[in-house]
Amino acid sequence: MSRIHDALRKATQENETPRGSRAETPRVQTAAPSSEPSSASVALLEMDDLDEVIRNAVQLPYNPLSDALLVNPAKPREAPSEEFRTLRTRLNHLQTLHPLRTLVVTSASPAEGKSFTATNLALTQAQLADKRVLLADFDFRRPTVEKTFQIDTSPGLTDFLTGKARVGEIIRRIGDSSLYVMTAGGSVINPLELLNLKECKALIDGVRNHFDWVILDSPPLLFAADGNLLSTMCDGTILVVRIGTTTFDSVTRALQSLCENNVLGIVVNGARRGELYSKYNYYHDYYDADAEPAEASEEDSEVAAEVEES
């Protein structure tokens, strides 16, 4: 015990300030609070005038890639227009039953057709005269919207979230249609951190009140947490799976990572044209005397099936 007391006494003596000296207190300098708002906060001020922003949105020519596999309103029988109209009908019916406007389209893994589905669903919804649709590319890791429509990637969402662009600069209109797009923007090293900013939630909430549908393309669920976070900010989530590629285990894990009450259903992608469209062609040819018989192709095609409510 004496050794313990000696050690404590020695420690006390070493910590005592010598008589006649004055211990210096470190000075902490605090910056005076800035009276000017940040660039991101300034950008959010435009949210109050979003109607005017949408009316004055920059109009871009409709010039998609020739191999983008987009639905063509001039060819309603061409695959996969019929399936996307079915998907549109299902979602519009759900919208009459629930407060449903913001929708995340995602997948379990890459290359399953989520961007294809999100873009074509947005185009199909915009074909209705009374619908104003916004397609937002929140896949900051592998964006596709600017490539599909052959437009500049910036200014886009990352530019807005980092305070480099205003809302009016990132919302652009495709042709004279009612389809508007927000590209991903410049590349960033911290996508998930940007999605956690309050400006991101405020933007989604803001556009929700000015569009009939806001469709978000997000990264795959099992490769990044971005899609899980975005699903908590939106009204519903659609999971895209690809026949012959997506495993049952991947679907199970993807669904478990989402809020169960937020999942609207699953879109099945990658069916053969002959499996889905031979009967459609027969139906249309039977009732259209001027139509020439159409042969169903057996090659694989990006085809989305209807939503199966989970």
Image: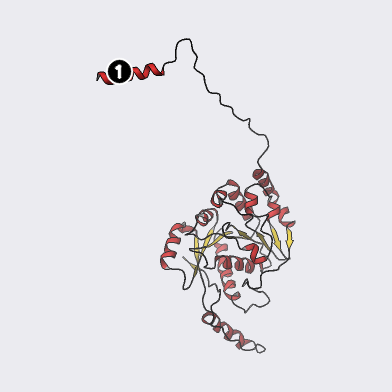
Q: Residue farthest to the top?
A: 20
Q: Position of residue 35 (x, y in %)?
A: 67, 34
- Residue found at the very far left of the displayed protein: 1
**Residue at point 36% right, 20% down?**
11
Name the side, left or right, on which 157 lies relative to 15. Answer: right
Which residue does the image show at 43% across and 68% down from the upper left? Answer: 247
Quadrant of the rendered structure where residue 113 is? Answer: bottom right
Which class describes the residues within 10 Å of circle 1: few (<14), some (14-19), or many (20+)?
A: few
Q: How far from the left and from the top, in percent, is residue 123?
A: 64, 68
Give the residue type at disc 1.
Answer: Asp
Horizontal and vertical percent position of residue 95: 57, 62
Task: Name the residue nearer the viewer: 125 or 243.
Answer: 243
Q: Is residue 238 above or below residue 67?
A: above
At 47% from the left and 71% from the top, the residue drawn is 245
Establish if 172 lies above or below 281: above
How many marks do you count on the picture?
A: 1
Instruction: Give the answer, above or below, for where 214 lies relative to 276.
Output: above
**Left or right: residue 169 compared with residue 263:** right
For the N terminus, the image quarter is top left
Coloring scheme of the render? secondary structure
- Observer-nearest of 51 and 273: 273
- Residue at the spot of label 1: 6
- Under circle 1, the secondary element is helix
- Percent coordinates x, y for residue 114 in the rendering: 55, 65
